Image (cartoon, rainbow, N blue to C red):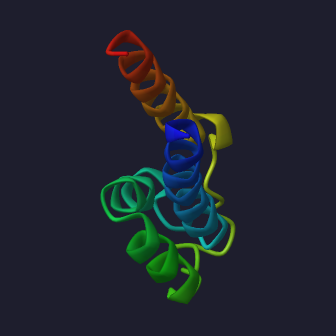
Amino acid sequence: MEFVGLFAWLGAAIGAGAIASSKNRSFFGYFLLGFLLPLVGLLIAIGMAPRQPAAAGAARGGGFAVVFPGIVLVVAVVVVYLATR
Protein backbone atom coordinates (compact mmCIF):
# COMPACT_ATOMS: atom_id res chain seq x y z
CA MET A 1 0.00 0.00 0.00
CA GLU A 2 2.92 2.33 0.62
CA PHE A 3 3.96 1.91 -3.00
CA VAL A 4 0.73 3.51 -4.21
CA GLY A 5 1.43 6.64 -2.20
CA LEU A 6 5.09 6.64 -3.21
CA PHE A 7 4.26 6.36 -6.91
CA ALA A 8 1.56 9.05 -6.66
CA TRP A 9 4.02 11.35 -4.86
CA LEU A 10 6.79 10.77 -7.40
CA GLY A 11 4.29 10.94 -10.25
CA ALA A 12 3.18 14.40 -9.13
CA ALA A 13 6.82 15.51 -8.87
CA ILE A 14 7.73 14.15 -12.32
CA GLY A 15 4.49 15.55 -13.74
CA ALA A 16 5.28 19.02 -12.39
CA GLY A 17 8.75 18.83 -13.93
CA ALA A 18 7.47 17.57 -17.27
CA ILE A 19 4.77 20.25 -17.50
CA ALA A 20 7.30 22.96 -16.59
CA SER A 21 9.79 21.60 -19.13
CA SER A 22 7.14 21.70 -21.86
CA LYS A 23 6.69 25.41 -21.01
CA ASN A 24 10.45 26.08 -21.34
CA ARG A 25 10.97 26.22 -17.59
CA SER A 26 13.32 24.27 -15.32
CA PHE A 27 12.43 20.58 -15.07
CA PHE A 28 14.59 20.07 -12.00
CA GLY A 29 13.31 23.16 -10.19
CA TYR A 30 9.68 22.18 -10.58
CA PHE A 31 10.49 18.53 -9.93
CA LEU A 32 12.06 19.57 -6.64
CA LEU A 33 9.05 21.74 -5.79
CA GLY A 34 6.75 18.85 -6.71
CA PHE A 35 8.86 16.47 -4.66
CA LEU A 36 8.64 18.65 -1.55
CA LEU A 37 5.03 19.81 -2.05
CA PRO A 38 3.46 17.48 -4.64
CA LEU A 39 0.08 19.07 -5.22
CA VAL A 40 1.35 22.63 -4.93
CA GLY A 41 4.18 22.01 -7.40
CA LEU A 42 1.82 20.40 -9.89
CA LEU A 43 -0.71 23.23 -9.67
CA ILE A 44 1.94 25.93 -10.00
CA ALA A 45 3.46 24.18 -13.03
CA ILE A 46 0.03 23.96 -14.66
CA GLY A 47 -0.74 27.62 -13.94
CA MET A 48 2.55 29.08 -15.19
CA ALA A 49 2.64 30.78 -18.57
CA PRO A 50 5.07 29.39 -21.15
CA ARG A 51 8.44 31.15 -21.26
CA GLN A 52 9.61 32.41 -24.63
CA PRO A 53 13.14 31.53 -25.80
CA ALA A 54 15.77 34.26 -25.30
CA ALA A 55 16.55 34.56 -29.01
CA ALA A 56 14.51 33.70 -32.08
CA GLY A 57 16.57 30.65 -33.03
CA ALA A 58 17.68 29.66 -29.53
CA ALA A 59 16.32 26.26 -28.69
CA ARG A 60 16.83 24.54 -25.36
CA GLY A 61 18.94 21.55 -26.14
CA GLY A 62 19.72 18.46 -24.14
CA GLY A 63 16.34 16.90 -23.45
CA PHE A 64 17.97 13.89 -21.83
CA ALA A 65 20.24 16.14 -19.77
CA VAL A 66 17.13 17.86 -18.40
CA VAL A 67 15.35 14.63 -17.48
CA PHE A 68 18.38 12.64 -16.27
CA PRO A 69 18.71 14.26 -12.79
CA GLY A 70 15.05 13.52 -12.11
CA ILE A 71 15.49 9.89 -13.12
CA VAL A 72 18.55 9.54 -10.89
CA LEU A 73 16.68 11.09 -7.96
CA VAL A 74 13.68 8.78 -8.39
CA VAL A 75 15.92 5.70 -8.58
CA ALA A 76 17.85 6.84 -5.49
CA VAL A 77 14.63 7.37 -3.51
CA VAL A 78 13.32 3.94 -4.48
CA VAL A 79 16.64 2.27 -3.59
CA VAL A 80 16.78 3.99 -0.21
CA TYR A 81 13.15 3.11 0.45
CA LEU A 82 13.69 -0.55 -0.41
CA ALA A 83 16.93 -0.68 1.60
CA THR A 84 15.20 0.58 4.75
CA ARG A 85 12.36 -1.95 4.62
Residue 72: x and y, percent? Answer: 48, 26
Residue positioned 59% across, 52% down in the render: 11
- Name the one closer to the observer, 17 or 1: 1
**Residue 42 coordinates in the image, percent (x, y):** 51, 72
Residue drawn at (55%, 68%), measured in percent from left and top? 20
Q: Residue furthest top?
A: 83
- The location of residue 74, given as percent across then percent down, is 49, 32
Is residue 75 left or right of 59 when viewed as pictured?
A: left
The image quarter in which residue 65 lies: top right
Please identify the quadrant where the N terminus is shown: top right
Q: Which residue reaches farthest front?
A: 1
Q: Is residue 57 above or below residue 4?
A: below
Depth order, front residue of 49/76: 76
Quadrant showing the C terminus: top left
- Residue shown at 55%/32% (left/top)? 71
Residue in the picture at 42% in, 61% down: 34
